[in-house]
Image (tube, rainbow, N blue to C red):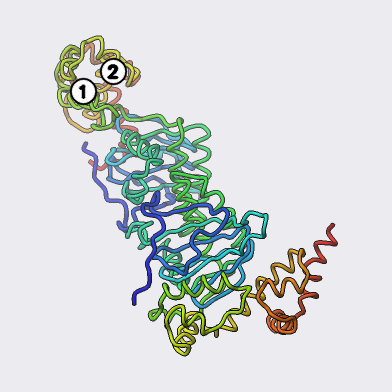
């Protein structure tokens, strides 16, 4: 099941849109688009899937999606009375909506960082969530320039916040991880390209001309993980994508993602996704994608 | 002859410049530039010439000058023993502040109109002035997105306001193609420096190498006034300031402002202010005294 590419902004020159979505469902397929999207759930049950991250939907849920990140929102509440069960506020914008000379000014570092981080989708919580939700609600009543001002305020709040957690696995979105250090960037690209093969620490260390010990320290310093943990997350992330989007069997997927044997695949998958690969595939198919036309 | 073009800030952060002026206005010349300029005069008195509009500059004045509009802000000379008192906030923005896509946004259409409406210069008053003053104070302290948000808020507030009136006349804007800002700057500076002395058309004409007739036409084109009328307004304006400060007596003030006799001072004062110097002083000082 491949995600569908969508073009969102009806007037592309605007580069920015605010929408109120109300209805029986979100009317949304497993899809992606080149615009950023900030989605606030005012009311809905059901599930959302962002990349390989499947989670139940509840009112107040706030997510920022980067460009080209596949996602689906699925409401499963029934209509009671006249109030439609699905209600969300959505902001869509292109990364070039902000003027070039602003983004390049040194004080825009946090915003540039936010845009990079959003590639995997960000779940926003706590006081940041409350503040951004309040501003989004005000946007419904504002018009013209005031709406843009509120939007910029939201970007500023998000860029300054630490209450943003990535959703999709690093392995799901290529380029979902970015290192300020070009050395680690090279390692990360190498991992993405050779994920179906064994990735030995000694080979990676040699790639960037470091001893194994120095490589290990540098890697842990920047990712907070050992090289083995990181590679496993990448492999499981890619496996999730294949489980959701392809017709390949679980065994084929395990090998395509570089797992040498099935029991290791199952163990790692269970540890990271709290389900077996076939359960994950089943969940995605029945909960998240059930409205998908065949 | 093409007028002098000034560009005050070479590469402003994020495409627009903002700064605080303390002491005195740095550029008292009659000049213009491509940038729109928003000037909030917090403290300090003096005079401003915007196109052919000429007025006393007062604390709290908020003016928006459109692109290419010739102007000059001039503070009064400092009282001996005191430091010059100007405290002002400036903001300059231009076409380059926003990308072309931004200027075409429907949300910015009011701002586009505001820039056109500011061609003769606009003086903002009331709640608009207070709100924009507050935003300008915040803006000079900020960076990043918040600085841009304040700029947009300022422009939106100004664009939505009806508490404003144009400064220069329509006739001035039509005639502005024939201006000679260098020459006018020379004249303007001379008048300011010699306000306490007699000022004659013949002296000024000789200084800028024009015949008396040509000078009179030149002066009228730029200010929409004759030289004596212009100089009298400037002198009465400065006299009002001194009367309000309350330190010199009326005769001293008349002489310090370049009036050679009292009856001329009183006549000019009455004509422009509809009151006598003494009554003016009493009216200005009375509330201050009562509050003590």
Q: Position of residue B236 (x, y in %)?
A: 67, 76
Estimate the spatial distance between the alpha carbons at disc 2 and disc 1, rounded to whole Å. 10 Å
Q: Which mark is residue B248?
A: none
Q: Position of residue A77 (x, y in %)?
A: 44, 39
Q: Nearer the viewer, residue A174 or A59?
A: A174
B23, above or below B46, in the image: above
Q: Residue at point 36% right, 62% down? A: B95
Q: Left or right of B36: which side holds B138? A: right
Q: Nearer the viewer, residue B273 or A66?
A: B273
Q: Left or right of A159: which side holds A176? A: left
Q: Chain of mark 2?
A: A
Q: Position of residue A122 (x, y in %)?
A: 38, 34
Q: Residues within 10 Å of mark 1 (few under 14, many from 20)?
A: some
Q: Residue at point 30% right, 43% down? A: A29
Q: Earlier in the sequence, mark 2 or mark 1?
A: 1
B266, above or below B25, in the image: below
Q: Nearer the viewer, residue A38 or B114?
A: B114
Q: Chain of mark 1?
A: A
Quadrant the N terminus of chain B occupies: bottom left
Q: Nearer the viewer, residue A245 or B20?
A: B20
Q: Is residue A221 visible?
A: yes
Disc 2 is placed on an element classified as helix
Location of residue A155 by image quarter: top left
- Tag 2 and tag 1, C-beta contact below 8 Å: yes
User: Which residue is under mark 1?
Assistant: A187
User: Which residue is under mark 2?
Assistant: A219
Q: Left or right of B238: which side holds B100? A: left
Location of residue B269 by image quarter: bottom right
Q: Position of residue A17 (x, y in %)?
A: 38, 53
């Amino acid at each position: 099941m491949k995600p569908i590419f969508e073009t969102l902004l009806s007037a592309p020159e605007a580069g920015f849109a605010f929408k109120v979505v109300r209805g029986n469902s979100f009317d949304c397929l497993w899809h992606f688009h080149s615009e950023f999207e900030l989605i606030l759930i005012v009311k809905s049950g059901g599930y959302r899937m962002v990349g390989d991250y499947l989670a139940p939907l509840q009112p107040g849920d706030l997510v920022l999606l980067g460009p080209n990140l596949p996602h689906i929102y699925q409401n499963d509440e029934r209509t009671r009375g006249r109030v439609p069960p699905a209600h969300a506020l959505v902001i869509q914008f292109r990364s070039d909506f902000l003027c070039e000379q602003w983004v390049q000014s040194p004080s825009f570092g946090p915003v540039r960082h936010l845009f990079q981080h959003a590639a995997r989708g960000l779940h926003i919580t706590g006081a940041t969530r409350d503040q951004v939700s309040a501003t989004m609600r005000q946007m419904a009543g504002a018009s013209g320039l005031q709406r843009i001002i509120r939007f910029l305020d939201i970007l500023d709040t998000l860029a300054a916040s630490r209450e943003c957690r990535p959703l999709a696995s690093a392995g799901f979105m290529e380029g979902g991880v970015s290192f300020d250090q070009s050395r680690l960037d090279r390692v990360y690209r190498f991992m993405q390209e050779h994920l179906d093969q064994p990735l030995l620490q000694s080979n990676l260390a040699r790639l960037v001309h470091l001893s194994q010990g120095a490589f290990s320290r540098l890697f842990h310093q920047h990712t907070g993980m050992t090289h083995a943990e990181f590679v496993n997350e990448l492999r499981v992330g890619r496996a999730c994508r294949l489980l959701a989007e392809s017709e390949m069997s679980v065994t084929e997927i395990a090998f395509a993602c570089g797992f040498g044997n099935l029991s290791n695949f199952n163990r790692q998958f269970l540890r990271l996704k709290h389900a077996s690969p076939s359960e994950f595939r089943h969940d995605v198919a029945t909960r998240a994608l059930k409205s998908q036309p065949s | 002859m093409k007028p002098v073009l000034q560009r005050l800030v070479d590469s402003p952060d994020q495409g627009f410049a903002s700064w605080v002026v303390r002491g005195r206005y740095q550029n008292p010349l009659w000049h213009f530039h491509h940038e729109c300029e928003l000037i909030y005069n917090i403290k300090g008195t003096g005079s401003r010439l915007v196109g052919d509009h000429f007025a006393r500059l007062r604390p709290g004045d908020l003016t928006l000058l459109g692109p290419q509009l010739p102007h000059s802000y001039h503070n009064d000379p400092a009282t001996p023993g005191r430091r010059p008192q100007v405290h002002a906030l400036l903001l300059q923005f231009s076409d380059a502040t926003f990308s072309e896509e931004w200027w075409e946004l429907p949300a910015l259409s009011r701002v586009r109109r505001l820039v056109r409406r500011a061609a003769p210069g606009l003086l903002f008053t009331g709640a608009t002035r207070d709100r924009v003053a507050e935003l300008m104070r915040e803006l000079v302290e900020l960076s990043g997105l918040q600085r841009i948000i304040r700029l947009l808020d300022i422009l939106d507030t100004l664009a939505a306001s009806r508490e404003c009136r144009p400064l220069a006349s329509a006739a001035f804007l039509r005639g502005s193609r024939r201006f000679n800002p260098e020459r006018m700057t020379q004249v303007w500076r001379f008048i300011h420096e010699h306000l306490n002395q007699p000022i004659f058309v013949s002296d000024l004409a000789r200084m800028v190498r024009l015949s008396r007739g040509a000078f009179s036409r030149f002066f009228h084109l730029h200010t929409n006034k004759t030289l004596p009328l212009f100089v009298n307004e400037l002198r009465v304006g400065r006299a009002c300031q001194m009367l309000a400060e309350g330190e010199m007596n009326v005769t001293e003030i008349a002489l310090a402002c370049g009036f050679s006799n009292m009856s001329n001072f009183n006549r000019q004062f009455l004509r422009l202010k509809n009151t006598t110097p003494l009554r003016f002083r009493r009216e200005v000082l009375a509330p201050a005294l009562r509050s003590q």
